[in-house]
């Protein structure tokens, strides 16, 4: 297995267009977190080869271009950002994909992994894992509609991983250009330990059934050193990082050998994020977003031996008080 510094860019292919990711580390789509503002302050820190929007739900009607543009933001020329779609069937998929491509989406990702009850109970997200044929139809329809590559993000199963091989082969046969496997079951939510052997199994299954589809591993990458471990233990083609990117936005760069952020850099990120949010949203939204960041934040060691202060910040109701705390935090 090559070292992280030796990994070459990853290219995937669509019906008409191909896409090359400059790095094999991906920022996971996370509802309520990885909006365009968050992506635009994290990606410049380095190490990220690709990212996706939060999922865009297709229901009774096609999703209009103006809605997709709200999720997508402005197309990037450095790191490709795909549009993630979630659908319970193939209806309205073709028109929605056309809208996404007009927005500049360089690839389409299909969500078959969301475990939330409000999604699962409407037979979308991870509920689709019980219906490999229906999943394949959605993928096949998307591939036929898109000129860009179509990828899939999925979990290993609902209550067990007994159909993992069947699902993997179904979506690969339908034309998925890349598969991201979150190594948890639907019943695990986000808090049970991830089971990386399922990622290794996915790599082996796809090779056995003759599909050399890149597999991106996802789940329980908590610190930079976990990235190399996942590559080494699973044989995956890339690694996707979710909540750990909220805890330490430098995790991608550090996995590539960059130094850990200083306290001053960690504070600087908070203020850059706050300014970016306030440029487009209210102070109330900014405060809620910073609380979300603060709950997980460990960059720069700002909260080492300060957990009581973290708790106080999360209970506070004034944005200025939170910003003042960060302003003084780096100096101890």
Image (tube, rainbow, N blue to C red):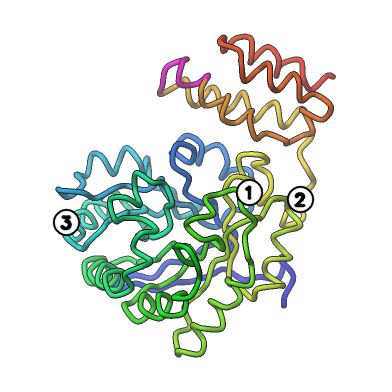
Figure check: 247 above or below 191 = above
Q: Are marks 2 and 1 in contact (CB under 8 Å)?
A: yes
Q: Looking at the magenta stretch, what is its main secondary structure?
A: helix
Q: Position of residue 215 (x, y in %)?
A: 52, 72
| Mark earlier in primary sequence (2, 3) | 3
Q: Which residue is mark 2?
A: 258
Identify the residue under disc 3: 92
Q: Residue at x 71, y 15 (%)?
A: 325
- What crowding class fits label 1: few (fewer than 14 Cα within 10 Å), some (14-19), or many (20 or more)? some
Look at the image and tell me in which quarter the C terminus lies: top right
Rendered position, 199 above or below 257 = below
Report the number of numbered marks. 3
Task: Say if the magenta span includes residue 120.
Answer: no
Query: Which residue shows up at 50% across the image and 41% down it?
Result: 39
Q: Which residues are magenta?
A: 281-287
Q: Residues within 10 Å of mark 3 (few under 14, many from 20)?
A: some
């Amino acid at each position: 297995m090559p070292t992280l510094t030796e990994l070459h860019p990853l290219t995937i292919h669509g019906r008409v267009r191909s896409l090359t990711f400059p790095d094999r580390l991906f920022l996971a789509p996370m509802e309520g977190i990885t909006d365009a503002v968050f992506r635009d302050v994290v990606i410049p820190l380095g190490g990220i080869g690709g990212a996706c929007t939060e999922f865009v739900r297709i229901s009774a009607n096609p999703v209009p271009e103006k809605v997709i543009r709200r999720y997508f933001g402005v197309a990037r020329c450095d790191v490709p950002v795909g549009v993630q779609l979630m659908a319970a069937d193939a209806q309205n998929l073709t028109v929605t994909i056309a809208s996404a491509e007009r927005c500049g989406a360089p690839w389409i990702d299909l969500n078959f992994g969301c475990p939330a009850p409000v999604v699962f109970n409407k037979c979308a997200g991870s509920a689709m894992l019980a219906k490999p044929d229906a999943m394949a139809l959605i993928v096949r329809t998307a591939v036929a509609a898109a000129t860009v590559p179509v990828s899939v993000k999925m979990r290993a199963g609902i209550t067990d991983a007994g159909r993992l091989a069947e699902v993997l082969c179904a979506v690969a046969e339908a034309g998925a250009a890349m598969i991201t496997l979150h190594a948890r079951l639907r019943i695990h939510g986000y808090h049970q330990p991830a089971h990386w052997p399922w990622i290794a199994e996915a790599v082996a299954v796809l090779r056995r059934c003759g599909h050399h589809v890149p597999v991106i591993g996802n789940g329980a990458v908590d610190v930079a050193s976990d990235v190399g471990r996942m590559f080494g233990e699973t044989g995956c083609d890339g690694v996707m990082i979710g909540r750990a990117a909220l805890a330490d936005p430098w995790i991608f760069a550090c996995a590539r050998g960059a130094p850990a952020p200083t306290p001053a850099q960690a504070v600087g990120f908070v203020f850059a994020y706050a300014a970016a949010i306030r440029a487009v949203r209210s102070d109330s939204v900014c405060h809620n977003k910073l609380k979300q960041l603060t709950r997980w934040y460990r960059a720069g060691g700002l909260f080492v031996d300060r957990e009581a202060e973290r708790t106080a910040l999360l209970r506070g109701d004034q944005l200025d008080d939170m910003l003042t705390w960060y302003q003084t935090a780096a100096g101890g």
